[in-house]
Image: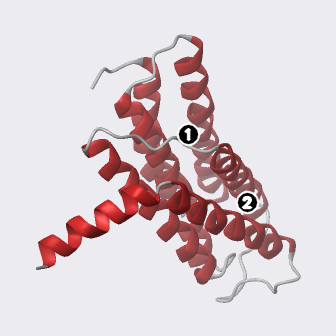
Amino acid sequence: MKLTIPNQLTILRILLTPVFLYFYLQTDPILKLTGTVVFIIAAATDWYDGYAARRFNIITRWGQFMDPLADKILISSAIIVFAYLGFLYWWMVWIIVIRDFLITFLRMYALRYGKSIVTSQTAKWKTTLQMSAVFLLLLYSNFNIPPDASPPPYTNWITLVFLGITLLTAFTGLQYLAENRNHVFELWRRMLKIIR
């Protein structure tokens, strides 16, 4: 692995995730706000590492795999916390998390055998919308008490926004599986051989 600037920023984003969680889960409003700021910094590294990679043409195979994985770790951590605090429905969280890590596993498998899975434009928009929605909910949650045990109704803006994101996430997952069905079938055959 070449420790290029984009790769360093990807590692930083992963390292900032537990820092964000620690501060955001505190009851002290200042510490909670600190956690939100940490998330914003971590999300900004995603934009900048992509820009730097394209601007200076320093795209690496490691970066192609780890950059989206770092995004998934950051976003998944945030939405799991939201569900835990009562802002989101758990079923939405599981669809997003399972889809993201299933595609990551498929990407890892493809790279293992010298193949690549290019991130689609729709998936890039999905990640941007996920980040934006998490950012909005982080700001909102700093000034509002979370619901008691259960998420807001389906008419609430939070639920509607994340319902749309959940559907888009599921769609991009199915799109990846369809476009990379050869990888999927090959992986399935290998798994069957192992089981036998």
Q: Secondary structure at mark 1?
A: helix
Question: Residue 114 location in percent, x, y?
Answer: 29, 38
Query: What amino acid does circle 2 point to?
Result: Asn
Query: What amino acid does circle 1 point to?
Result: Ala
Question: Residue 4 location in percent, x, y?
Answer: 39, 18
Relative to 44, 136 lies left or right: right
What is the basis of the colouring in this image? secondary structure
Q: Secondary structure at mark 2?
A: loop
Marks 1 and 2: which is nearer the front? 1
Which of marks 2 and 1 precedes in the sequence? 1
Q: Looking at the image, which residue is at 49% across and 44% down?
A: 68
Q: Looking at the image, which residue is at 61% across and 22% down?
A: 51
Residue 42's disc number: 1
Res 85 seen here: no
In this rendered view, identify the residue nearer to me: 8 or 30: 8
In this rendered view, identify the residue nearer to me: 40 or 93: 93
Residue that numbered label 2 is attached to: 142
Res 134 seen here: yes
Relative to 45, 168 lies left or right: right
In this rendered view, identify the residue nearer to me: 128 or 104: 104
Q: Quadrant of the N terminus?
A: top left
